[in-house]
């Protein structure tokens, strides 16, 4: 049976990239009637130091963003990672299956650790192994993610296969990444070759789900582009990453293909395309921001939702963890 798992880190305010690449698609999967688990991955967030009060606020913010984007806590299992022990406990066992060299090869580790990797947290290095545990603790079959997470899902498959091989079992299924649509990699508004990221030092590089209409319009107006008008076919964007990014964002927001957007706006200058894009972005994000703010006014209610979700998640993961402990040879006599 199909079971979907995915997560988002409460490590900053969410971006349009997180919305188009993740949240919006998460809601679609739920609406297709598939069993879905969506997690606020607070254990991942602390791989880089987080102020405790800020972590709590951002955890509720991500939960609110899930709900505002259409995740229904009755139909999906919505919770924060640290409330379900299987993540950390299976994570440890998988740390002992995965190889250090595999971790050093991850491009996200190289990007985030930078030049001084010896001084990054051990958790940042082991991050993909915890992510493997997130997925495998539920024997999830499919993982909707943005393009940047593809390498980590491949590693999850390697870890699952090595576990099965090392213990001579056929226990973990191989999860499939789901990387679909025109917005699997939304790029920075300042640099069309760099991913839009919530931890980019430049706020101008991204649209936050908490930005108001004026801020969104201004950021899109100032987005980097070239002087050429839009071409009449998609091939004309091949060497124009900044323009291509705006077309992709437009397509994802409008529910169109990039080809359709180019056909509709062939020959348009950015002076006219950008305001149309801004209108579309505001029309999508405005209601989400408003709903997030409404939900965040009742933090206790959000915490209660996360707690109930955690109980349901635990009911699925605990027996799977227990089986893993048996396979590994651990005595549990209480
Ligand atoms: N720019 C993006 N385009 C499409 N999808 C994206 N995602 C992130 N950025 C883009 C997808 O959002 C989900 C949650 O991401 P995450 O919170 O686990 O962190 P991340 O992938 O590391 O994203 P960020 O925004 O760049 O966070 P920081 O700056 O903290 O590292 C994932 O499915 C991701 O693919």
Image (cartoon, grey):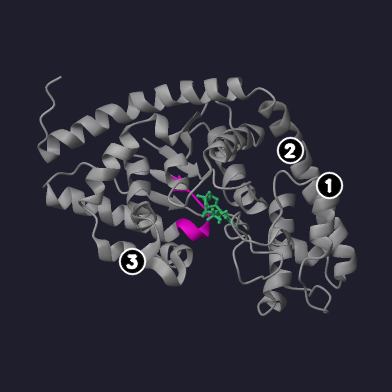
Image position, residue 16 (x, y; %): 67, 51
In the picture, measured across the screen, residue 145 lies left or right of residue 124, that is: right
Residue at image coords 86%, 50%: 214
Q: Which mark is residue 20?
A: none
Could you tell whether 77 is left or right of 160 in the image?
Answer: right
For mark 2, give the secondary structure: helix
In the rendered structure, does residue 312 fall within the stretch colored magenta?
no
The stretch in magenta equals 143-149
Does residue 318 appear in the picture of this structure?
Answer: yes
Q: Helix, strand or loop at disc 1?
A: helix
Q: How crowded is mark 3: few (under 14 residues within 10 Å), some or many (20 or more)?
A: some
Is 228 displayed left or right of 55 in the figure?
Answer: right
Residue 277 pos. (x, y %): 81, 57
Residue lying at the far right of the rendered structure: 272
Asked which quadrant contains residue 316, the reply is: top left
Q: Is mark 3 on a helix, strand or loop?
A: helix
Q: Residues within 10 Å of mark 2 (few under 14, many from 20)?
A: many
Between disc 2 and disc 3, whose residue precedes?
Answer: 3
Cα gap from disc 3 to disc 1, whole angstroms: 41 Å
Which residue is identified by label 1? 213
Residue bearing mark 2? 289
* Residue under numbered circle 3: 104
| The N terminus, quarter of image | top left
Labels 1 and 2 touching (C-beta < 8 A)? no
């Amino acid at each position: 049976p199909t079971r979907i798992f995915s997560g988002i880190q409460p490590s900053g305010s969410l971006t349009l990239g997180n919305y188009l690449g993740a949240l919006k698609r998460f809601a679609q999967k739920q609406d297709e009637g598939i069993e879905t688990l969506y997690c606020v991955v607070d254990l991942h967030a602390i791989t880089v130091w987080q102020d405790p009060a800020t972590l709590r606020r951002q955890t509720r913010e991500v939960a609110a963003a899930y709900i505002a984007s259409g995740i229904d806590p009755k139909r999906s299992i919505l919770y924060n990672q640290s409330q379900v022990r299987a993540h950390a406990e299976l994570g440890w066992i998988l740390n002992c299956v995965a190889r250090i060299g595999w971790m050093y090869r991850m491009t996200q580790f190289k990007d985030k650790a930078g030049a001084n990797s010896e001084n990054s947290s051990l958790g940042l290095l082991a991050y993909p192994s915890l992510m493997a545990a997130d997925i495998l603790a539920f024997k999830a079959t499919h993982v909707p993610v943005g393009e940047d997470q593809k390498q980590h899902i491949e590693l999850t498959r390697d870890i699952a296969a090595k576990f099965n091989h090392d213990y001579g079992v056929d226990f973990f299924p191989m999860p499939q990444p789901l990387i679909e649509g025109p917005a699997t990699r939304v790029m920075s508004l300042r640099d069309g070759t760099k991913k839009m990221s919530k931890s980019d030092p430049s706020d101008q590089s991204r649209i936050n789900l908490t930005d108001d209409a004026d801020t969104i319009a201004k950021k899109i107006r100032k987005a980097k582009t070239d002087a050429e008008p839009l071409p009449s076919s998609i091939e004309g964007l091949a060497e124009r990453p900044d323009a291509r990014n705006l077309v992709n964002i437009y397509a994802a927001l409008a529910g169109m293909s990039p080809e359709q957007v180019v056909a509709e706006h062939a020959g348009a200058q950015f002076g006219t395309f950008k305001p149309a894009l801004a209108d579309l972005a505001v029309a999508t994000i405005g209601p989400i921001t408003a709903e997030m703010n409404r939900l965040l006014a009742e933090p206790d209610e959000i915490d209660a939702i996360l707690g109930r979700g955690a109980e349901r998640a635990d009911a699925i993961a605990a027996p799977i963890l227990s089986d893993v402990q048996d396979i590994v040879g651990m005595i549990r006599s209480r």
